[in-house]
Amino acid sequence: VITIITIIAMIQRFILEISRVNTDNQALLKNLESNNQALKSANEALERFAYVASHDLKTPLATIQGYVETIIIKEEQKPLTAEKRKEYLVIALKQSNKLSGLIDQLFELAKLESGSMTPSLEVFSLKELLHDSLQDARWSAQGKNISFKMDIDDQDYKVKADIALIQRVVQNLLDNAIKYSPENSIIRLHINNLDDKTSLHVIDEGKGILAEDIPYLFERYYRCQQQRHSSKLGSGLGLAIVKKICDLHKSSISVSSQLGKGSEFKFALTRV
């Protein structure tokens, strides 16, 4: 009898050990699947970077190289006038700044897509943030004589969000509105409270966006049909960054547009 009881106990311990090993194996498989997914995401990010490096990064880099080489060759043959040398250097500097900005956007988007970023939530006034952002935006809009009209009352419009990330959203939306607005136009800004949300609206008077482009507007590297042959193309990353930041806040970003009249971008945050 003792022997049978001992054998039964051994069998029970064996079954428990098998169960534990099986659980450990399942956890290991789950970790392997997670690691494979992370590796897949990293490979996809690398492929996206390679795409940009071969297209968007290559153009400004080639321009910089071309003008610097021109300066060197011209100086060896016949010295350039101070005016011409300055013209070439200004173009090279402009392309260098463009390249630097694009690289910054790539790293920013990669960080947002990595899943490692957690918003640092705090209460602040969306109205004050907009006022601060407009200081830089007005300077950028001067060259096209674009003005801003704020349709905002005396409320503070306090929200709870990551102030640095939301400032980036506002900056990108203002930059986008300036880029695609015609000269001597007006960009209208509106803040609205609705239930537990506060929304910011950025409305331009640009050419508008084709209906078939709108569903893809916030995808990385996407460019609208009517802008693909323009000499003023952006990187296609600004609105993708906006979308990722809104996603981090469990918020939404949307756009409505009419051809020939302009577009309206709006996003909402948790109201306080």
Image (spheres, helix red, strand yellow):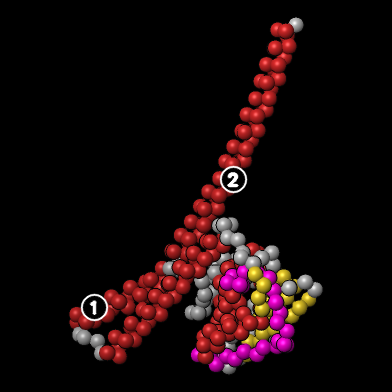
What mark, if any, has residue 90 been given in the picture? none
Q: Look at the image and tell me in which quarter the N terminus lies.
A: top right
**Mark 2 lies on residue:** 34
Compared to 224, does 11 lie above or below?
above
Q: Residue furthest right?
A: 195
Residue at image location 49% in from the left, 65% down from the top? 106
Q: How many marks?
A: 2
Residue at image location 52% in from the left, 57% down from the top? 45
- Find numbered disc 1 in the image and state the secondary structure of the residue it sits on: helix
Residue at image location 24% in from the left, 81% down from the top? 74
Q: Position of residue 88 (x, y in %)?
A: 33, 83
Looking at the rendered image, the disc whose residue lies closer to the viewer, 2 or 1, is 2
Q: Position of residue 176 (x, y in %)?
A: 58, 79
Of residue 107 and residue 271, the one placed in the foreground of this image is: 271
Task: Please check the rendered image and state whether residue 144 is part of the magenta-colored stretch, yes or no.
Answer: yes
Q: Position of residue 69 (x, y in %)?
A: 28, 75
> Which quadrant would residue 12 be assigned to in this image?
top right
Viewer can see residue 211: no
Q: Position of residue 132 (x, y in %)?
A: 58, 83
**Mark 1 lies on residue:** 73
What residue span does the magenta drawing correspond to?
143-166
> Which quadrant would residue 168 be assigned to in this image?
bottom right
Q: Look at the image and tell me in which quarter the C terminus lies.
A: bottom right
Of residue 195 and residue 64, the one placed in the foreground of this image is: 195
Residue at image location 64% in from the left, 84% down from the top? 204
The disc labelled 1 sits on which kind of residue?
A: Ile
Viewer can see residue 60: yes
Q: Decide which of tag 2 and tag 1 comes sooner along the chain.
A: 2
Of residue 188 and residue 73, the one placed in the foreground of this image is: 188
Near mark 2 (Cα within 10 A), the count class, few <14, some 14-19 or many ≥20, is few
The disc labelled 2 sits on which kind of residue?
A: Ser
Compared to 120, does 172 lie above or below?
below
